[in-house]
Image: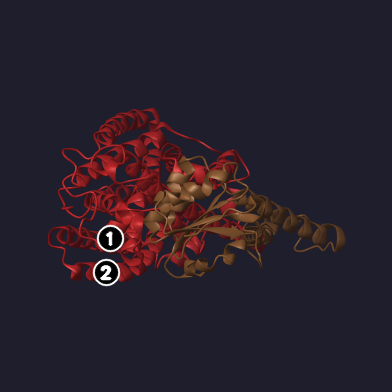
Chain colours: A brown, B red
Amino acid sequence: MAHTVETTNALHGVMAEYDSGQALVDAAKKTMAQGFTRVEAYSPVPIEDLNTIIHKTRTVLPKLILAGGLTGMATGFALQYWASVIEYPMNIGGRPLASWTTFIVPSYELTILFSALTAAFGMIVLNGLPRPYHPVFNVERFSMASSDKFFLVIESEDPQFGAAAAFLRETGAKGVYDVAE
Amino acid sequence: MSAVATSETYTPSGVALPGMRQFGMIAGVLGVVLAIAGFFMSGEFGVDRFFQAYLVAYTFWMGVVLGCLALLMVQHLSGGVWGIVLRRPFEAAVRTMPIMTLLFLPIVFGMHSLYEWTHAAAANDPIIQAKTPYLNTTFFYIRQGIYFAVWNLIGLLLSKWSAEHDRTGDVALLDKMSRLSGAGLVIYGLTVTFAMVDWTMSVNPHWFSTIWGMLYVGGQGLSAFAFGICVLAMLAQTAPLNRVITNHHFHDLGKLLFAFLMLWAYLSFSQFLIIWSANIPEEIPHYLDRWENTWKFLSIFIVVGHFMVPYALLLSRDLKRSVTRLRVIATWLLIARLAEYFWHVAPELHKDGMTINLLDVALPLALGGIFISLFVSNLGGRSLLPVNDPDLDKALHHHVH
């Protein structure tokens, strides 16, 4: 495979192609052991092991969801308090205006609603979606990522990027390609 | 690893859980000694207090057994990795049923202490009078006979077929077990509803709640999951299961424990909210009796200790994946379950304020000791995993994200 490194700045990264998920996992392990940090893998099927290999930092999403849920709870409670105590006080069977016991159910529903929306939209935003353009598609072979080939990319922001292409060739890759920005 | 698994691969050598057996024996002996001491210390009220404490202790431990029966049937229907690793502990718990049935007899002898509707004076109470077609001793005996016959039969068949399946690997048995479980769960729901109306709701024959049975169904599931987690945490420490059980399994079980905690809280709150909103004199005494005097402290404990604190802790993914911490929560929840059964029964018999007797501690220990000893001896002798189950491989190579 002819491969010429032009200007490093113009590259998104270098991509290596593998024939099997296991080869990709092995390569990912070697790559992480070598000290590369900006690594991403692409596969036509979910590979459970990859999560623990290349994504060492946990996602912040659960904390966002908790915050979203608490916001929902506060919103639900405040809405009902405002409606039944401040804006439209009504005597219902002699019960206190701020009957917090009855506020619990709608507050709970809004907790769930806000959590679920935070989870869905948070996932989309943290994944960087929507994303109409991604450099990996500049590599023609990458279309096989939705068929039966497996890819590992070391991105150009990696401090050791200069050694990346040479390193990936040692990992049993079927081909190593430049990924134009 | 599992390609050559036979029932011997996962059969414990010797006692399955030596530590737990020791705990069961000590608790049993200590409980009986303390119960005798507590009985004589209570003087003239000794008999009444004994049966009251016995009802609470029995409802709690039988709740664990029935919860195990229900979850055993659920997992025969739903499948799933959690069911594979907990099937044998559940079956071992269900096989204590014959002895647990015998242990119901003291409640029959204590009916006069527990149930106002058995008293001669009840004839002058128009509300109890109107309920006599259901609340009379003969029909009570018949109903108990039916419940225990049905529970024993379902438990016996499921356990027998499961052992047979271990030996033969005949897939027709899986089908038989899931068919029985489908019908069994319906029967379980009905019998537990009626049984809990009999055992605990009729302690106050004037009061009624239609969600009472479901509340116990949720509570029994919670108890059974908490018990299962404690057992599995101990089994995972030694051979043969230490090679098999990982924190992925505990993560799953932690989620299910969390779900059942929410189910229980949902049902408890539903009962409360409906009664609070309606605010009618037939229904509110249940909560007034538990709020207007020192029982209030126990009520607050149920809300905070049984729900809020475990709920907040179980939100954490790390906690659910840590065997030691999850086991602490599970043990805590079992204690909270016992407190809730006490909260259901005791305030009805002591309306003037909270009172806790030595018997209230001794009898749960004694019955727990007996149950745990039986459970451990049932657990030994059989493979700890259903080796012929088609999902076993999945259970052994289990990952959760």
Contact, mark 2 vs mark 1 (Cβ under 8 Å): no
Quick check: B149 left or right of A51?
left
Does dot 2 land on a helix, a strand or a loop?
Answer: helix
Relative horizontal placement of residue B376, taking residue B249 as reference (left or right): left
Separation (CA) of disc 2 from disc 1? 12 Å
Front residue of B179/A3: it is A3
Picture residue at 32% right of the left edge, 46% below the top: B245
Residue that protrudes farthest toward the left in the picture? B168
Indicate the secondary structure of the residue bearing disc 1: helix
**Picture coordinates of residue A80, whole percent (x, y):** 77, 60
Mark 1 crowdedness (10 Å alpha carbons): few <14, some 14-19, many ≥20: many
Per the rendering, the mark at residue B249 is none
Chain to which mark 1 belongs: B
From where the camera sits, is residue B202 visible?
A: no
Chain letter behind tag 2: B
In the image, residue A125 lies at what x, y percent?
66, 59
Rendered view: A79 above or below B361: below
Q: Type of residue at label 1?
A: Trp
- Disc on the earlier residue, 2 or 1: 1
**Amino acid type, residue under disc 2 in the picture:** Leu
Q: In the depicted view, which residue is nearer to us: B75 or B294?
A: B75
- Nearer to us in this view, B391 or B304: B391
Q: Which mark is residue B180?
A: 2
Residue B64 visible, this angle: yes
Q: Residue B199: horizontal and vertical position, in percent?
A: 39, 54
Residue A142 appears at what percent x and percent y?
Answer: 51, 66
Q: Dot 1 corresponds to which residue?
A: B151
Mark 2 burial class by Cα count in 10 Å: few <14, some 14-19, many 20+? some
| Residue at image point 62% right, 48% down | A60
Circle nearer the viewer, 2 or 1: 2
